[in-house]
Amino acid sequence: MMFSTKAEYGIRVMVHLARQASEASGGEGVARAAEVPIPLASIADAEGLPLAYLEHLVQRLRRAELVESRRGAHGGYSLARPASDISMGEVVKALEGEIAPIECITADADGALVCIREGEAGHEPCPTKLLWTRVQGSIVRTLNDMTLADLVRPLPKKEKATA
């Protein structure tokens, strides 16, 4: 399963905003949103991403109340909540919609996964439904367990092996 560039680029925007918040607060910004909004053109330049596409993505993030925007000369975008309070599941859902590992498995109104063959006369539910349900559950659980703050924290340095 591959996520689209919407998820890739949108997550990069969110990480950029979280890093700026962290730097603006002296390394403690992972815990709260940035005070100063960052122009989208600045993010596009820093990340090497197309500005027009990012404009579309931040609108999705804004509608999901993950980022806030400010207009004007000192306008731009900032996180709507602390990075530690934003799950990657929220971000991916805002950008991609519901996660379904294959097209024939969809979520019903209660969030339960349903095989499109269920309920069709003469068809048994797909024997692979269990597999795809577990795959979907694992992906969603991983995304929900990881926060934006987890992506901003520096990676632990590997110790050099001595020969």
Image: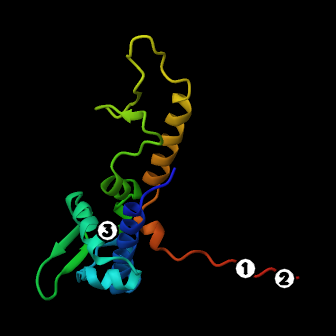
Q: Is residue 149 above or below residue 103?
A: below
Gap between marks 1 and 2 measured at Cα: 9 Å
The one of 115 and 159 positioned closer to us in this rendering: 115
Q: Whole-percent x and y of residue 74?
A: 16, 87
Q: Is residue 88 left or right of residue 73?
A: right
Q: Residue at x 51, y 24 (%)?
A: 126
Q: Earlier in the sequence, mark 1 or mark 3?
A: 3
Q: Is residue 17 above or below residue 61?
A: below
Query: What label sits on residue 162 in the rendered view?
Result: 2
The one of 93 and 153 positioned closer to us in this rendering: 93
Q: Is residue 126 above or below residue 34?
A: above
Q: Residue at x 42, y 68 (%)?
A: 149
Give the labeled residue for mark 1: 159
Residue 128: name its quadrant.
top right
Q: Is residue 153 left or right of residue 84?
A: right
Instruction: Evaluate whether residue 85 shows in this view.
Output: yes
Q: Residue at x 42, y 22 (%)?
A: 117
Q: Earlier in the sequence, mark 2 or mark 3?
A: 3
Q: What secondary structure is marked by label 1?
A: loop
Q: Whole-percent x and y of residue 68?
A: 20, 70
Give the labeled residue for mark 3: 82
Q: Whole-percent x and y of residue 35?
A: 23, 80
Q: Is residue 105 left or right of residue 55?
A: right
Q: What secondary structure is marked by label 2?
A: loop
Badge 2: few (under 14), some or many (20 or more) residues near its Cα, within 10 Å? few
Instruction: Evaluate whether residue 25 shows in this view.
Output: no
